[in-house]
Amino acid sequence: MKRRTFLSLAAGTVGGACLGSPMAGAAEQPKPAEPAVPFKISLAEWSFHRRLYGRAQPALDNLDFPAEAKRFGIDAVEYVNVFFKDKVKDKDYLAELKKRADDLGVRSVLIMCDAEGNLGAPEQPQRDAAVRNHQPWVEAAKYLGCHSIRVNGYSEGTRAEQADRVADGLQRLCEFAADFEINVIVENHGNLTSDPKWLTDVIKKVGLPNCGTLPDFGNFPNEIDRYEAVQLMMPFAKAVSAKSYDFDAEGTETRIDFERMMDIVLAAGYHGYVGIEYEGSRLSENDGVVATRKLLEKIRAKRASA
């Protein structure tokens, strides 16, 4: 499948900028190289889910999310589709969201996609519908400048049956997304996806370069060693989610050893975005985001000077 006319808006914007520039045709000056850092920090929109649902104050609108991230000292964002689910094909809305992020110098990293059907649904028609339902999010991710969409790998049946079905849905969605240069990544997000062996076997079964994982520091049942699990997922990781719940007086996360987790992440050769995803209840969402950012910045500074 080829790129849809949905992207013509982006092409027109770029073309117009070139035609109107007084420097059009002139040799571009090389940009200074960005300083090397062990990893970059982004903000997952779910960190503010209570504010976005209007259950906590101050309330937050999806269009204002890039500005809110910037206010918290973060210049990269990870959207959640449920907060603009009816806008996926709305060119004006997406153009406004992109403009707000671009004007602030905020990078759109990925879109987390939920409630679009099971890519591993037992019946083929249901699976086909789930693949189709995710395709507009691929197009939106491309337009916004993201590198990936995050999907769920849910199914029914035996482990082997679920693996085959999820791999089928994922493979077809990845083939579509490849034409847009977008990755399709699966998070450990419950059911069998929280079994790292099962999930990585599915990714291998798909066998496409734009199919990968999004290791989340949380979302594992008690019987799974979260550190071993993340280590298994990291060779396929195209994003990382730094799930946090609570912090002690020294700013250390009380349920997850962030130092150990980040050592695993970096040892795998990953130096991309690590997304803050605060999901605690004792601290406010604002305070939880700040605490997670400070902890990641502390770890990053230590690793950079090591």
Image: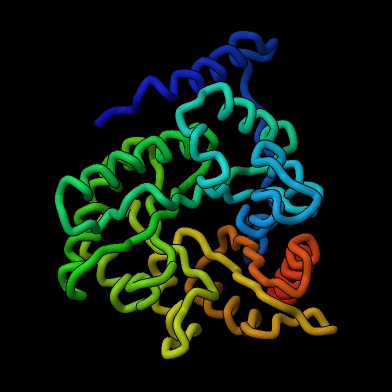
Q: Nearer the viewer, residue 158 or 236?
A: 158
**194 sits left or right of 60 in the view:** left
User: Where does the image place residue 136, in percent across and percent down from the top left?
Assistant: 39, 35
- Choose top left, top right, bottom left or bottom right for residue 257: bottom right
Among all residues in the image, which is located at the extreme front? 55
- Choose top left, top right, bottom left or bottom right for residue 162: bottom left
User: Where does the image place residue 25, in percent across and percent down from the top left?
Assistant: 59, 13
Task: Give the quarter of the figure containing the N terminus.
Answer: top left
Residue drawn at 50 percent across, 19 percent down: 9
User: Where does the image place residue 207, in percent across and percent down from the top left?
Assistant: 24, 59
**130 sits left or right of 66 in the view:** left
Residue 207 in sight in this render: no
**In the picture shown, does residue 5 fall above or below 260?**
above
**107 sits left or right of 132 in the view:** right
Residue 8 in sight in this render: yes
User: Where does the image place residue 68, in percent across and percent down from the top left?
Assistant: 76, 46
- Choose top left, top right, bottom left or bottom right for residue 105: top right
Q: Nearer the viewer, residue 5 or 219?
A: 219
Residue drawn at 47 percent across, 88 percent down: 222
Q: How many marks?
A: 0
Residue drawn at 54 percent across, 74 percent down: 217
Task: Give the quarter of the figure containing the C terminus.
Answer: bottom right
Residue drawn at 78 percent across, 60 percent down: 286
Q: Nearer the viewer, residue 27 or 284?
A: 284
